[in-house]
Image (cartoon, rainbow, N blue to C red):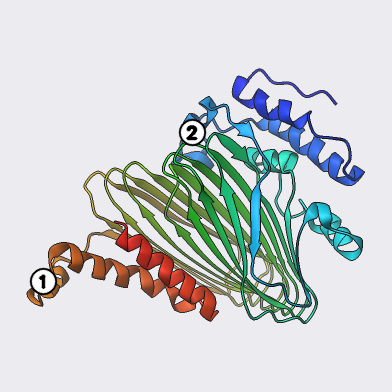
Amino acid sequence: MKISTNEAHETQYITEFHKFPKTEPSWLEEIRTQAMERFQLLGFPRNRRGNEFWKYTDVSALLTKNFEHEPANSAAVGSIPNGLSVINLNGAKGHLKDIAKLYLAKFAPFQKDPFISLNTALFQDAVLIHAAEGIKIKNPVKIHLHSNDGKVTHPRVLVIAEDGSKIDISLSHYGHSSGDYFANVVSEVIVGKNASVSLFRAQREKPDSFHIANTFVSVSENGRFDYFSLDNGGGVARHNVNISLSGQNASCNLSGVYVTRNTQHVDNHTLIHHLDSNTTSDQLFKGILLDSSRAVFVGQVEVSPGCKKVETHQTNKTLLLSPSAEINTQPVLDIATDDIQASHGNAVGQVDRDSIFYLMTRGLDFASAQKILMEGFLLEILKSVQNESLLLESTESINRTIDEL
């Protein structure tokens, strides 16, 4: 099918789509074609008025860029134990190839989101992480995804944790240059029955870059998903996290830290679907904003009709260290049943002056006292990180972020 558009900044992506060699399996070619058709119809979100999903995040600067396409640069760090597969999709064979066909693009709906449809149409390879049934992986799988000046990449990550397995993943995003580039990321995570997945996501893109990420997670009966994110980069960064708790006793714990400076804009949108009874979810996000930076946090929870004994809690706290900094924070609870426990809270303020004064009376200068209080404010969020290696990596990342302020 011939696909065309009148928008010059979208034509570059469609032109790239037509360059794809016809060597892929027919099922993947069909998915790509459908996704590009949707991208043509949807287009980028140009107007924010009347578009609640993009109300607080302006991507108009992205639409003026003509980036050169390149394959996503990814690397797995460390040894791979038995029972765990970490490969590129193009190298999948036999059972893994069948698994990729079964799950790829099944949980990240490209029909409604232009960035997901663009990624689905144009990703040139995907990272496939598969934990076999009953396998407990002790050390985290570390994946690095990096970008280059003037380029656009569409990294794709597919994680499958079979029933009874346990896996921890560290996913890092960063740039090699100081110029502008565009990283358009999609991740799909499938947590089987009685399985556990922990995901640490670090976004350290360069100050002039664009980073749009979508993460979709499906958690089965008695499964657990733990998530921690650190946003400390990007000129315009947006991350959508969509969790489906689709089995009895499924649970998730989402936590995140965002630190912005200069004119950075960081946006975190979360959506947790409680689709079965006895499911639980917790969210805790904290941020520090400096200079004329902006941040957005929208936390949405949906509880389906008929779901009983559901428990969900959500908190967002932000420190504004400049009169020009701005935070838009919004809790959304959509609950269609009575037998639940639910809470939400938002707080915006400054570093406590009395605490700073106390530390200064103990010999610290103002800057050192403020950094100690900021570290304490952010490090509290790590109580939920269970894996020792991920806890160490998270702690070091937060401390390094504070030291750079």
Seen as rendered, the residue at the extreme left is 361
Q: Is residue 271 visible?
A: yes
Vertical relation: 388 (above or below) 254: below
Q: Which residue is denoted by mark 1 in the rendering?
A: 360
Secondary structure beneath label 2:
loop
Q: Provide residue 127's location: percent of width, then percent of height.
A: 72, 56
Secondary structure beneath label 1:
helix
Q: Is residue 266 left or right of residue 117?
A: left
Q: Is residue 327 left or right of residue 121?
A: left
Location of the C terminus (image quadrant): bottom left
- Mark 2 vs mark 1, foreground winner is 1
Location of the N terminus (image quadrant): top right
Vertical relation: 19 (above or below) 202: above
Specify few, some or many for label 1: CA neighbours under 10 Å numbering under 14, 14-19, or 20 or more.
some
Q: Is residue 244 left or right of residue 330?
A: right
Q: Is residue 317 visible?
A: no
Amino acid tagged 1: Met
Q: Residue at x 11, y 75 (%)?
A: 358
Quarter of the image for residue 304 reads: bottom right
Q: Depth check: give the residue in front, 32 or 93.
A: 93
Q: Provide residue 223's location: percent of width, then percent of height.
A: 68, 76
Q: CA distance from mark 2 to mark 1?
A: 45 Å
| Nearest to N terminus: mark 2 or mark 1 | 2
Q: Residue at x 43, y 50 (%)?
A: 233
Q: Which residue is denoted by mark 2 in the rendering?
A: 48
